[in-house]
Image: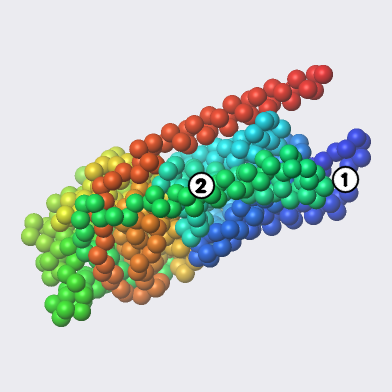
Amino acid sequence: MVAPAISPEPEVTGSAARPRAWVAARALAAVGAGALVYLSFPPRTLWWLAPVGFAVLGWLLHGRRPRAALGYGFLFGMGLMTPLLAWTGIFVGAVAWLPLSALEALLVGVPCMAIPLVTRLRGGLVLAALVWVAGEYLRSLFPFGGFPWAKIAFSQPEGPFLHLAALGGTPLVAFAVALTGLGLGDLARRAAARETAPRLLAVPALAVVIPLVAAFATGPLVGTDADAGEVTVAAVQGNVPRAGLDFNAQRRAVLDNHVRRTEQLAADVRSGAVAQPDLVIWPENASDIDPLRNRDAYQLIDRAAKDIGAPIALGAVVVGDDKLPRNTVILWDPQRGPVDTYTKRQLQPFGETMPMRSFFRLFTSAVDRAGNFVPGDKATVFAMDEARVALVTCYEVAFDGVVRDSVRNGSNLLAVPTNNATFGRSEMTYQQLAMDRVRAVEHGRAVVVAATSGVSAIVRPDGSVSRSTDLFTPAALVERVPLRTATTIADRLGAWPERVMVVIALAALVVAVARARRDQVK
């Protein structure tokens, strides 16, 4: 796959085209705007760069024809996606990274193509922000089941916009960030054009101020109280023998690491160094040896559970009767052994599954490293002491509906077992931790993140991180966390805020296109 050949067009006044140098400057500005949004994502804490990037984008798109807007939007997307998704090429190279970045950038260009049209309508800035949300919705569905990794909400775990997740989830956060940025860009554009009459500046000024005021005002409404009690949780990070695609070549070593670190935790409990945990979370792929079929793995895990004296939720690769693997979390009771399971529902394409395997094999043999996993079909809550633990495995945390279904299934705590060893020391693990923090606020739950190689963390219901580990370091985090059964407004509304935003955006686009055609006829 190669990047589409899209050349932004200059705005035309009469029959004179703008100089090519001016077009080149606009193109560079579009890439730079995307880069600003990228820099707003963790591990950096520069959340405010996201609206600044949208301000530049809005200025560039003003008055553009659809083809030009698509081009500038694509360049904006490349400035955002290329560095943001660099981790996808850590061990497989540019053959995965650059085509994925280009495809995602093209999907960013699609809503950008519509933004100049809807901004001509009354309430154009609001409609443009809604169009952006519709574009994110498209990327969450297409291609290959969607890839919502670059949602703007995931750039905001440090900023005030995070509070809005409790009201309308990630779509509302994205809408607020985009509206603030587009309003700021419109203010700057009007100031540069000396359009400084108060009536001209009022609307963009309100577009900047209202989302920020709403974000700050929502902060006190974010629930953090322990309305269902408290439990002491432990997240165990056993580490892996080595990073890379073959991290699990020594599967027994990975399992041994997690058993060993749990037994060390048990010794620390007996010495009084740490509190006795009520429940323990191990990472995804903690045991790539099926403990339900392998006696040695069974005995090791059972020994660790008895030693720590608490139930363990552990990630394991389990082989079904059809001989195909499942990415599974097993609930292991210290007295009864394995008592419940959860199978990952949203599988990672090009990792756990390989779409169009024969086609992509023409470009690289690395496709044969991808698995043939079978997805699960239901959300599961583990009963662990007083906790009712909703489970979301690694990649699933990026998908609104998957997390929502898990949390709304009677949970009072959220656990995210994950494995990021295949992405080395890249930013991927920090980007995923940002998603965990957004989900904590969105659903009003403490989140326990257990990673094979890091970063493991304990996240409070307000999205703050109370404890975390370093990368590629064996560790165990022990923390007292609140249990919460209260549902947020975002939980109660479910997918409806996004649906309404998308419908309004599409309706506005239809009206804008019809009006443009009518004007052409005149």
Q: Tell me: residue 452, above or below residue 504.
A: below
Residue at 92% over, 36% down: 15
The C terminus, quarter of image? top right
Residue at 25% over, 47% down: 485
In the image, residue 386 lies at what x, y percent?
Answer: 16, 54
- Crowding at mark 2 (Cα within 10 Å: few <14, some 14-19, many 20+): some
Residue at 14% over, 51% down: 339
Helix or strand or loop: what does disc 2 sit on? helix
Q: Is residue 88 visible?
A: no
Residue at 65% over, 39% down: 125
Disc nearer the start of the sequence (2/1): 1
Helix or strand or loop: what does disc 1 sit on? loop
Colour mapping: rainbow
Foreground residue, 61 or 316? 61
Q: Is residue 190 left or right of residue 86?
A: right
Q: Is residue 522 visible?
A: yes
In the image, residue 81 lies at what x, y percent?
Answer: 59, 54
Given the current orientation, which residue lies at the most extreme right position? 15
Q: Is residue 9 left or right of residue 399?
A: right
Q: Which residue is mark 1?
A: 18
In the image, residue 52 lies at what x, y percent?
Answer: 64, 55
Given the current orientation, which residue lies at the most extreme left position? 335
Number of the front mark, 2 or 1: 2
The amino acid marked with disc number 2 is Ala
Q: Which residue is mark 2?
A: 214
The amino acid marked with disc number 1 is Arg
